[in-house]
Amino acid sequence: MKQTIRLFVVSAFFLMAFQSCKKTTQKGGLEVAENYVANNYTKQEVDIEMRDGVKLHTTIYSPKDTSKAYPIIMQRTPYSSRPYGKGNFRKQIGPNSNMMKEGYIVVYQDVRGRWLSEGHYENMRAYIPNKTDSTQIDESSDTYDTIEWLVNHVANNNGRVGLWGISYPGFYATYGTIDAHPALRASSPQACIGDFFFDDFHHNGAYLLSYFRATSLFGTPRPNGDQPIDTAWYTLPDIGTEDQYEFFLEAGPLKNLNAFFEYDIKDQTSLAPDGMTDDFFWNELKEHPNYDKLWQRRGLIQHLDKTKPHVATMIVGGWFDAEDLYGPLETYKNIEKHNTGAYNTMVFGPWDHGRWARRNGRSLVGNYYFGDSISEFYQDKIETRFFHHFLKGEADGKTGLPEAYVYDSGRKEWSEMDAWPPKQITKKTMFLSENQELTLEPKGTKGIQFVSDIKKPVPYSEDIKSVFTPRKYMTDDQRFAARRSDVLVFETKVLEEDLTLAGPIMANLKVATTGTAADWIVKVIDVHPADAETNEEMQDHLKMSNYHLMVRSEVLRGRFRNSFTHPEPFTPNTKTTVDIKLQDVFHTFKKGHQLQVQVQSTWFPLIDLNPQTYVENIFKAEESDFKTQTHTVFTDSNLEFSVLE
């Protein structure tokens, strides 16, 4: 199947790198002239040779004022360092407008195998420890070699280098801290991918079908023998409808989607007898359904014991980031664990993916309004201060910033913490009891049943649309799900005082199924009171009255309940323990609200449909494998919350 939609501008998933501007734009009170960069910076494009001879295309913006020395701030990206060519300038450079106006040498680099850089691209290239010769390269060595060239060849640099990036560039910003160059003094991985089995394309082993259209961006080989290219060579699958729920339901088993990853020019099939497609990333997804050596080697979290103490890190994330929440939380925690002598802080706000890089004034995720100028505060008072201190200032770690700058998404205010999770938390257990109650004590061990119909899976959103990658559902009103018979609901009584959750949540389920396979989804929800005021951006068919705000949610593919590497079936009609780690939250359920928990077994098409009968590889399941089953949740199931006292 020939694809017809060419992607020339990377979507919001890859962070708004080439936003258009008017001649003068107002961004949260900070004016930025359209031609500011061209008027104040010189641009140079160079090909920097790595230790193995491969050259990486690099764009360098240097202040025209050469009367002083400047630090270097760099972003390495698979999404292009465009615009290419003399006289073509970005509208804005650097992490934010403050830093652009303050003066930095700003560098963008196409990573190995992408766009105008030579070499072969590997998706989440594996780290190589203890390298023995110049042929052993990874993103750490490429970062090191690039910094070495920059500090020795770029005029007027002060010998200090910083890294930053959001999403995949955030992964490279983390990678540069491992076996770091001595000149690297600060890095801010933001929404950084940590492991593709837990970020983006998988969540706890469940394949995120909602990322289907993004696959070709990573897996399409460059044309002409993998030669550098300055225009997009990949296309996005065209599913031909805005109703992605119906499309994927009618498409059936995942193997029926193989045809979308044939890239032959003449519309001739290129599927080999073994079922491999032209897209190497799709092939990896479908041939490696378990957490095997391929995914294990590419994960970066397990290598953060090799970060260097001379590199200050500030990890940034959004509490409502649908794409990369695991990555930044685990990156912060593991650097903190392994590199105790380093400056390491975290910033988490009420943002979706990369929203902190914008200056939009009112801060929303989906329908839900969190406050004014939250991103502006972050850029002006946190990010700029961090980089200025370590790249221009004293660099003694006395930044005036706390260990954790975190936004309470219920109280809608920033808090400064001296540790994350906070030292003042206690564990509080709540049980999934009968009569839809969430109680502090168990009330028996009765089983509550529901039918999981594979022809009518629970949607993850009530919106009818086709997305590139999902965002809005993270704060969606969950009333539509609570009203379904295949979604179990448990909730507290109306709270008589504020309840603040700060840290991880663990769901300890006791379940059974009539089949041999099942997914388990747990959602933590803030039920607002009837008199809650509706904000102006709310969708017309909704009101804030009784709004069911999803605060946190997670899935575990049941076959991985004991091991992500060695899956196993359920024994039918047998009570089984399924523990699900939900990512951290910082949210106050205010007096007059209720805390609700929903449990379900489908979440479509956010995740792919589980056949509910065990097969070795769901990507290769047959239509006949898919069976409607009856599931049971027992009332000795509970959630363990981290409560801030």
Image (cartoon, rainbow, N blue to C red):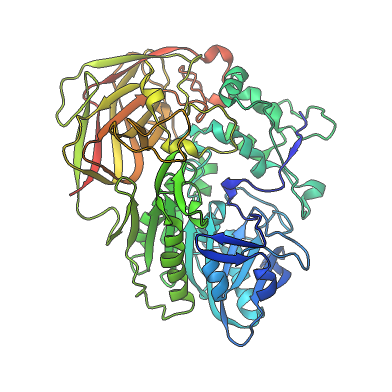
Look at the picture and state if 39 lies above or below 226. Answer: below
Q: Is residue 439 above or below residue 105?
A: above
Q: Is residue 41 visible?
A: no
Residue visible at 50% across and 21% down in the picture: 615
Does residue 316 appear in the picture of this structure? yes
Look at the picture and state if 571 lies above or below 110. above
Specify whether 618 is left or right of 238.
left
Question: Between 499 and 141, which is closer to the camera in this rendering?
Answer: 499
Q: Position of residue 474 (x, y in %)?
A: 43, 38
Seen from this angle, which residue lies furthest right?
A: 266
Q: Quadrant of the N terminus?
A: top right
Badge count: 0
Q: Position of residue 537 (x, y in %)?
A: 47, 40
Residue 52, located in which quarter of the rendered image? Answer: bottom right
Q: Position of residue 511 (x, y in %)?
A: 31, 21
Percent of width and height locating residue 637: 24, 27
